Image (cartoon, grey):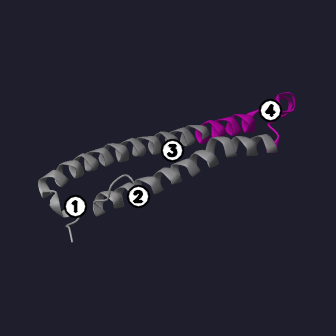
């Protein structure tokens, strides 16, 4: 029988594309890590803002509290989902993607999988 094509290709020709794949994976991992850091920063900014708003509301006089009012609980829940829960879910998925890329890099697999 004939030899498979994989064995006929010299090893130096195979290592160059693997080096390119590794560099691409490194760049992709760095980009995903930046995205995760940005998401976490955004969530922290939101939580700080909410804490400041709550503190300001607590320090108000009773009359100002009556006039100013407070967000209904369901509005706060929707904001929490939008600004905290969904972004953290996206960050979790990005971390899983990073872990997949790391295993691909360690195992020497192609990006086609």
Characterize the magenta stretch by its predominant secondary structure.
Answer: helix
Determine the secondary structure under disc 4. Answer: loop
Determine the secondary structure under disc 3. Answer: helix
Q: Viewer-nearest of labels 4 and 2?
A: 2
Q: Which stretch appears magenta?
A: 47-73
Mark 1 packing: few (<14 Cα in 10 Å), some, or many (20+)?
Answer: few
Q: Residue 97: x and y, percent?
A: 45, 53
Query: From this viewpoint, which residue is outermost toward the bottom?
Result: 1
| Residue to which mark 4 is pinned | 61
Q: Viewer-nearest of labels 1 and 3?
A: 1
Determine the secondary structure under disc 1. Answer: helix
| Residue to which mark 1 is pinned | 6
Residues at marks 4 and 2, CA–CA distance in whole angstroms:
51 Å
For the residue pair 44 and 84, the one nearer the viewer reads as 84
Q: Residue 26: x and y, percent?
A: 30, 47
The answer to whether the residue labelled 3 contacts the one labelled 4, judged by CB atoms less than 8 Å apart, is no
Q: Which of marks 4 and 2 is nearer the N terminus?
A: 4
For the residue pair 99 and 85, the one nearer the viewer reads as 99
Determine the secondary structure under disc 2. Answer: helix
């Amino acid at each position: 029988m004939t030899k498979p094509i994989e064995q006929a290709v010299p090893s130096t020709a195979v290592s160059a594309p693997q080096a390119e794949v590794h560099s691409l994976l490194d760049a992709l991992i760095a980009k995903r890590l930046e995205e995760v850091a940005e998401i976490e920063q955004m969530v922290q900014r939101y939580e700080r803002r909410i804490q400041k708003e709550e503190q300001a509301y607590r320090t108000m006089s009773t009359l100002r509290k009556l006039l100013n009012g407070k967000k209904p609980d369901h509005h706060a829940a929707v904001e929490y989902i939008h600004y905290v829960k969904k972004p953290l879910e996206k960050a979790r998925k990005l971390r899983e993607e990073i872990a997949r890329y790391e295993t691909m890099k360690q195992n020497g697999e192609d990006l086609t999988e």
